[in-house]
Amino acid sequence: MKLYLSSIGIPTPDDLSELLDKPLTEVTVAFIPNANDYYAERAWSVVTSQRVTPLEALGMKVTVVDLRNYHDGAVLEKTLQRYDLIWVTGGNTFLLREEMRKSGFEQVVKGLLNNGKVYGGNSAGALVAGESIGGINLESSDPPEYAEEVIEDGLGLVPYIVVPHVDNSEFSEVMKVVAQWPDRAKKLIELKDSQAVIFDGDKHRVVEATD
């Protein structure tokens, strides 16, 4: 499996291009914005557009895939097969995780990655890729009540817990809570806002923006 997980956006575009094995100008992206479903419709559209823009600025061809439109994993899988990169943006982690279950995303994503698709995600999109999102519900910055069902299991795409924003004062307290949960020390990958972690098979490495 190949994954590119960050705190904010794509801090090292060249590394993502290498992972995808093609120039970013040739990359097609399924952009999943459902961590922001707590916004009203107009605000949701504005926020989604704002978060798509940096990917398009890198030359990628981006299509928004709203998980709320899917209730059958097979249909969603057929849609996602059209794209090189599945990018999951940040927002409320519990709301995102719930939509991943309702839509069937959690059932099909591993198969897609095993067949050559790349998963990318920032903030909440990075958190859900790991083993667990438990702990972030203990702080008010990521309210679990936004979701009808609170799911603390991650997707388990990687055998780690990816903790973004460790140097960001807005999120640092909640990430400390996540990191301090029992038996996690050996499983944590902590990311600054300028960093990403790249998984390629059984290897991973942390990269950082140079500017």
Image (spheres, rainbow, N blue to C red):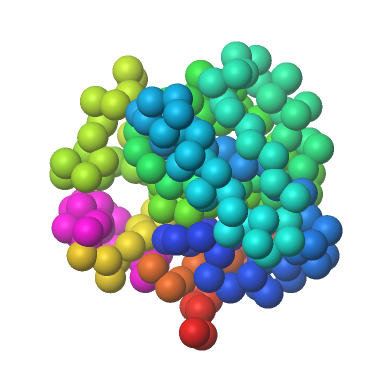
Residue 84 seen anywhere in this rendered image of the structure: no
For residue 92, which quarter of the picture?
top left
The percent position of residue 134, horizontal first and vertical second, equals 28, 41
Relative to 147, residue 31 above or below: below
Residue 27 among those drawn in magenta: no
The furthest residue to the bottom: 210
Above or below, 13 against 103 in this view is below
x and y, in percent, of residue 34 in the image: 48, 33
Quadrant in which residue 20 is drawn: bottom right
Residue 144 to residue 25: above or below? above
Residue 58 shows up from this direction: yes
In the rendered image, the residue lying farthest to the top is 71
For image coordinates 69% across by 25% down, the residue present is 76
The answer to if 174 sits in the magenta stretch is yes
Closest to the observer: 13 or 115? 13
Q: Quadrant of residue 136?
A: top left
Q: Is residue 111 left or right of residue 101?
A: right
At 57% from the left edge and 26% from the top edge, which residue is drawn?
A: 67
Magenta range is 170-192
Where residue 25 sits: x, y (%)?
A: 79, 62
x and y percentages locating residue 173 in the rendered image: 17, 58
- Residue shown at 45% from the left, 33% from the top: 44
**Nearest to the observer: residue 109 or residue 55:** 55
Number of marks: 0
* Nearer-the-camera pick, 159 or 55: 55
